[in-house]
Image (cartoon, rainbow, N blue to C red):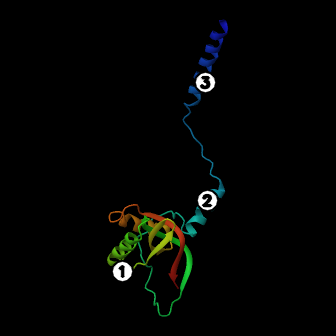
Amino acid sequence: MWYKGLILCFACIGFSWAAKGQQTESVSVHKDTLISLLQHFRAAHEINPPAPRMVSLGTKPVDRSKATRVKKRGFRVQIYSGNNRNEAYAVQSRFKSEYGDIDSYVTYDEPNYRVKVGDFTGRAAANNFMRELRSQYSNVFVFQEDIWVWE
């Protein structure tokens, strides 16, 4: 029975020592240089840019008669996902009537149809457009995928 008292004594000493260790008032932070390199890389490739940007659905007008359409890695906003084909095309039609200048795409990945809109080169612009669409569509998400841009 005497060993229970000894265990209790060591437990009390351990708890008081742990409580004293939590009372430190200074904290030093050592930042690894790789973090700065990663932040600069992500900013250069518009992956979570450090400062939010204004929504721009097109950077500057492009003369499409002289430009070519190329595939790039970018972002699209999904506004519909479900197994009803007619509903998917109805959502696409409704979107086209409201935003005629923004491309929309219907894809089928068994068993679901997905409607995705826009060709955004930066995540910030896609996120801003997603926030705008949330009031009109349910289950709106941003996806990274190949997009079409005019050059």
* 10 Å crowding of disc 1: few (<14), some (14-19), many (20+): few
Q: Say which residue appears at 36% left-offset and 80% top-offset.
A: 100
The disc, 1 or 2, on the residue closer to the chain's N-terminal end is 2
Most extreme residue toward the top, as rendered? 1
On residue 17, the disc is 3
Helix, strand or loop at mark 3: helix
Q: Secondary structure at mark 1?
A: loop
What amino acid is at disc 2?
Ser
Frontmost of labels 3 and 1 is: 1
Q: Which mark is residue 19?
A: none
Q: Nearer the viewer, residue 125 or 18?
A: 125
Which amino acid lies under the numbered mark 3 shown in the image of this protein? Trp
List the residue tagged with mark 2: 36
Q: Residue furthest bottom?
A: 65
With 66 as the anchor, is 88 left or right in this view?
Answer: left
Q: Nearer the viewer, residue 95 or 38?
A: 95
Dot 3 crowding, Cα within 10 Å, few <14, some 14–19, many 20+: few
Q: Residues within 10 Å of mark 2 (few under 14, many from 20)?
A: few
> 4 or 27: nearer the eye?
4
As drawn, the label of residue 100 is: 1
Q: Say if mark 1 contacts mark 2, CB within 8 Å.
A: no
Q: Viewer-proximal residue, 52 or 5?
A: 5
Q: Position of residue 87 (x, y in %)?
A: 37, 69
- The amino acid beneath tag 1 is Gly
Which quarter of the picture shows residue 105? bottom left
Q: Is residue 47 left or right of residue 126?
A: right
The residue mark sitting in front, 1 or 2, is: 1
User: Mark 3 near mark 1, Cβ–Cβ under 8 Å?
Assistant: no
